Image (cartoon, helix red, strand yellow):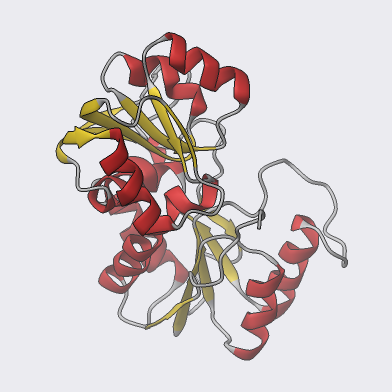
Amino acid sequence: MTRVRDITNSVAEHTRPENAASWDPVGLQLGDIDAPVQRVGVCHEVNEEVVETLKRRRVDLLVTYHPLLFEPTNRLLAGRSAEARAFRLVSMGVNLLVAHTDFDAAPGGTAEALASTLKLRELEPFGGDPVEGMPDIGRVGEFDATLAVLDALVSDAFGFNGLRITGNRHAHVNRVAVVPGSGSDFIASAAERADVLVTGDVPHHRAVRAADLGLAIVDPGHTATERPGMKALVDLIALVSDVEVIDLTDIDPQTWS
């Protein structure tokens, strides 16, 4: 019989959770390591829709990309909050496994999936900081086209809604850096290696700093930059488990409309 332990250990062999960001609660977050598993769900984020869906499509283990509980808590009460969703999962007997920045950094993970979507070549990892406990959650690759061409690729992949771009669209781009999710902390590092950074959640003043460093920004949004990696996560869980896998990654946690 497959148990939570078996899938957790198999995922860890691919994602190396010990290499996750120091602040990131990856690994088994809720449940019993010895519980049996007959069905696994995979989601982008444990939001209300995912929890409601699990009432109809019951699973024994839910694998999520975004952690449900980021901060320590001393209460799990019914209601509408991350803690309340944790309470409901426990009540339903659903174990919860997190693969986040460890999966960003892993071969074939979120960063490489984003880079592949943008047709980048000769990928190199970047973004790691051993002092800060940060793995290489980004990738840099060759591109060889204009910023306008990159704009079109991003638009085709993620749509125009919410897309923001800085820089000269006629400028030639040789190298592109990608960081899934919120990557504005990596602007200085990306500027040393690339002409453009594709990431989400870039605030105004950091975009100004990027311009000062000669780095263009393409920001399709936090969730959009992670979407290619969700298919890779489903594929990973299907690879390492011998039970039924339920794909819930079509439940998009996009907050902006």
Residue 229 shows in the view: no
Q: Is residue 95 above or below residue 223?
A: below
Q: Residue at x 56, y 65 (%)?
A: 252
**As rendered, which of 224 and 44 lies closer to the eye?**
224
**As rendered, which of 39 and 211 lies closer to the eye?**
211
- The answer to which quarter of the image holds residue 170 is top left
Q: Residue at x 75, y 56 (%)?
A: 82
Q: Is residue 67 above or below residue 64?
A: above
**As rendered, which of 9 and 213 lies closer to the eye?**
213
- The location of residue 45, given as percent across then percent down, is 58, 60
**As rendered, which of 188 and 14 lies closer to the eye?**
188
In the image, taking residue 18 as reference, residue 250 lies left or right, namely: right
- The location of residue 103, given as percent across then percent down, is 37, 48
- The answer to which quarter of the image holds residue 161 is bottom right
Screen quadrant of the C terminus: bottom right
Q: Is residue 126 above or below residue 111?
A: above
